[in-house]
Amino acid sequence: MKQITKDTVFKPVPMWAKLPHPMRFHEATSVATDSEDNVYVFNRGAYPLIIFDKEGNYLSHWGEGEFDRPHGIRIDQNDNLFLIDDMAHMVQKRDKNGGIFFTIGERGTPAEWQSGKFFNRPTDVAIDEKSGNIFVSDGYGNSRIHKFTSEGKHIKSWGQPGSENGQFSLPHNLSIFDSNKIALCDRENFRVQIFNFEGEYIDQWHFHRPIAIYSKQDSKNLFIAEAGISGESGNNGVPNLGLRIVIVNEKGEKLTTFGKGTLGENPDQIIGPHGLSVDSEGSVYIAEVSFTSFGSKQDPPREVVSLRKWKRSE
């Protein structure tokens, strides 16, 4: 696949996911692709894990009644799933059919708010393909990154509330890139922070409320979703201020962007970006908490588009 440049084009694929009746996403919170480019959608509907092929054809589903509030998903090199349930305060490793390997955290039992212990509403997970070590961002009720062994045993944690280097204000999404670096969406500090695997601070890059991030471990490119400011704001609809995907290199230098930058249901727009994945062909999948961001505010409230595919074309 060619390197991404300012001339790389991504085009929306309208109505990509072919959901059979009566399935609905309600809203998709996160998305991941496996080694065969099958697409796993973690969502807040009645069928929390729905699987499609790359053409959007429905394959299977599982997970009914097993989650409190789906939040994040990642798939490792062996096609195992790591699922984040923020309201259950837990991370689970499962096989692709839903079988549980292990759970980190005690379901329904949060750590004390901002105590630094795991977990209080964790948000995302990244897996080191070489060691199998697991990194978890935590989260809505904490300001930490936790590191675990491949078996889920705690190794160390770092981070605290604040806006200085190595401090966080809602660590929301993280990914491993450039072999051995962790990129964290420090959402309410409007930046992405970079660390090594031991938690040592390396760098930070400014974005307009970065909420989701994706990279392959051996890649120098990162895909970052900018959420912009939600609600009534003078920034709504202003170009270059959110509701778009920004692609940068390993130094944080912008390569290209896509997404119109205005909230809406048209194919070239984005409503509430929340999770990202990229398949082997370079196509980008965006999961959106669009009911929370938009649909719930309609009269009457209604479900709106919450999963989009943008196909890469050279």
Image (tube, rainbow, N blue to C red):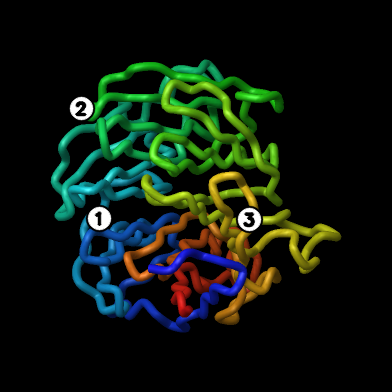
Q: Residue placed at 19% from the left, 67% from the top?
A: 60
Q: Amino acid at mark 2?
A: Glu
Instruction: Give residue 227's position: percent from left, percent from top.
Output: 64, 56
SS of the residue at dot 1? Answer: loop
Place residue 141 in its image quadrant.
top right
Relative horizontal placement of residue 197, taking residue 49 as reference (left or right)? right
Relative horizontal placement of residue 42, taking residue 141 as reference (left or right)? left
> 191 or 6: nearer the eye?
6
Closer to the chain start, of discs 2 and 3, is 2
One can see residue 70 in this view: no
Instruction: Give residue 107's position: percent from left, percent from top.
Output: 32, 31
In this figure, which residue is indicated by the disc labeled 1? 64
Q: Residues within 10 Å of mark 3 (few under 14, many from 20)?
A: many
Closer to the chain start, of discs 1 and 2, is 1
Instruction: Give residue 224's position: percent from left, percent from top.
Output: 56, 54
In this figure, which residue is indicated by the disc labeled 2? 151
In the picture, the disc for residue 128 is none
